Image (cartoon, rainbow, N blue to C red):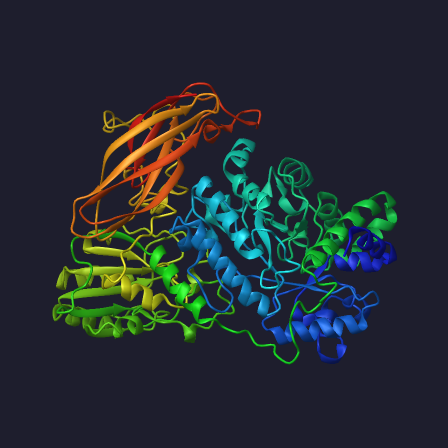
Amino acid sequence: MKDKHLVELLKEMTLAEKVGQLVQLTPDFFAQGGEITGPMQQWQMSEAQSYQIGSILGTHTAEQVYTIQKQYLEKSRLKIPLVFMADVIHGYETIFPIPLAMAASFDEQLIEEAAKMAAKEAAEAGIHVTFSPMADYVKDARWGRVLESNGEDPTLSSVLTAAYVRGYQGATNNLNKDKKRIAACVKHFVGYGAAEGGRDYNTVDLSDLEIYQNYLPAFKAAIDAGAALVMTSFNTVRGIPATANQPLIQDVLRKKLGFEGLVISDWAAVAELIAHRVAADGEEAAKKAFHAGIEMDMMSDCYMNSLAQIITAAPELQQQLDQAVYHVLKLKDSLGLFEDPYRGLNEADLSVHLDADTRLSTRKAAEQTTVLLKNEGILPLEKNQKIALIGPKADSKDILGAWSWIGKQEDAVSLKEGLSEKHLDLSVLSYAEEEVLSDHYIEEACKLAEQSDVVLLAVGESSEESGEAASLTKLTLSRRQDVLVQAIAKHNPNVVLILFNGRPLVLSDIEESCKAILIGWFPGSEGGHALANLLTGTVEPQGRLPMSFPRSVGQLPLTYGQLSTGRPKTPDNQDQKYISRYMDEENDALYPFGFGLGYGSCEIEQTTITHISEEEGLYEVNARLINHTEKAHRTLLQLYSQDLVTEVARPIRELKQWRKVLVPAKSSIDITFNISETQFAYVHSDLLLKNDPGKIALYIGFDSKQADKIGEIAI
């Protein structure tokens, strides 16, 4: 539909119909036959109002979408189709590893392809928009929603966030023609990951410098990639809830980042302005949110009951209302809904066709995202070993994660099922993971451990312990799983710890009890097969940590990119008191950002820095990787920088580029990084991104801590 037709449609709409387009409800507001439902009664909502709304969120099936859309169009005066949205976070029904795990791949192509496959399944179920990707910058593992993030590095997160958008929407953003793609809604704008104390929905207090330097880049990357929607966050920014924050939305999001699409609130966030005590009632909440620039009210009745009166009392807001409604209509038009309200759904065939290739892709993704943190020669397993598989996660199908709401746990492959296909001498002692481990189970586990060569100890979090509203003050293993680890290690030192988790955990008390540690995360539908392949050496672990694992929860928030201080801890002064350090713990992480092992190894033996274009400020950084071993090794080479003198305090190290590399056995390979001076620009005190003249130190290595300085460049 051409813009002029959208404008003509807008002119036909009544005030009530315009307001309706800015309202999003759940499917339970619609019932067969159109009778008044419980939610409609609770909201004192008329049937006429229900056939003026603009969007539905949270449908489960294509049949549900088709039925609601058909019923709606039959009763709607202008026949403007509904747009259906849902949380498609890491797969729809076929589930990929959680986003934090996917970030461990450091692989934008993998993520783009996974998002493409998730979009296809979701589109076949009638979904038009996903509330993904999450671009929040995170450095506090107490916050359960780190599960949905790309980790602690703004550069990595920016690259991967853009990859999600391309995967969902397609590189050309031609959603009208490609009905197997869906629109992306990037969230949560902004600062949600900095909730104080790591407590979900809590206050955020950030400097503008921190927001511009670390929190905005991933959103900018998503917007530049064409993200169709932006969702605001629950938290405050500069003391004002984001949902009512006009400077944040109008000046930063619209002007600074150039976003031209639809801005939607999070669930009931407009009404929650009352709980924030910045609005006295629903009408004031609607007024503040609308003035700020919220264009769709997700699951509150504030706009529905108050916005028309607000516009009538202030006719100067009519233009803003029309702009908001235009954004809704434009989104629907971009999806092709005016030409085909069902977007390819056929009443004769409303099933989701699960693709075996997608299922296989989830297995490959889990293989590439699992992180080997420790291995004292015990992995991979050998066929002649007697192996015990013990723990609450041994035969658990709770491996999908908190946001896999459509995925079926019963269809997931447990670790036991995956290992059973490997023809190992395997004994299994599982346990109901929601229960606290009993003394009897621990005794039986220790007996089995004594009779075995190797113990595979499968422990970790349940889906309920990680994700939204899953904030923790303790990040050690719960339900006496730590007791189990330590007890078994006393009976058999050959312990391989396999962790299922949605966040970094504190492993300091059990790390020494294990000869190997494998971070499986919530690995998705094919997790058991993927982990079995990794444990037996069919596949080499290649994941690297996108978020540091702390030594203690007291270190949080924690990032490798900490700022320089006036009294830094150094190798020469670490025994002194009056420096920036803890008295009872080291400053750094137990396992740092970028860290991970494989079954092989290689060394960096030659590095060079070449200034290839002074006029364009281009440099070439070369490194030779040498594999002296008898097996090929896949690794992640990482390039970091440190700006030696800056206007504002800057991180000690910053990730700039990375390369996934396969180094054949008994051979070497040369890796080249092409880097420009623009990549060293940073946000100054005037909030402008620019370069300083001066020297930059460059580091190359296999993680953020061990990367070695290779030289300096002058810009």
Against 61, is 580 above or below? above
Q: Quadrant of the N terminus?
A: bottom right
Against 237, is 644 above or below? above
Q: Residue 559: x, y in percent?
A: 39, 40
Against 491, is 172 above or below? above
Horizontally, is 202 left or right of 634 in the view?
right
Horizontally, is 229 left or right of 149 in the view?
right
Q: Residue 129: x, y in percent?
A: 61, 59
Query: Toward the viewer: 241 or 709?
Result: 709
Task: Identify the residue at horizontal 54%, vertical 65% (top origin).
Answer: 120
Q: Residue 3: x, y in percent?
A: 78, 51
Number of disc labels: 0
Which quarter of the picture shows residue 8?
A: bottom right
Task: Identify the residue at horizontal 36%, vertical 53% (top origin).
Answer: 475
Task: Identify the residue at horizontal 84%, vertical 67% (top origin).
Answer: 77
Horizontally, is 589 left or right of 297 in the view?
left
Task: Identify the residue at horizontal 58%, vertical 24% (top origin).
Answer: 686
Q: Residue 670: x, y in percent?
A: 29, 38
| Residue 698 appears in the rendering | yes
Query: Toward the viewer: 639 or 285?
Result: 639
| Residue 581 appears in the rendering | no
Q: Quadrant of the C terminus?
A: top left
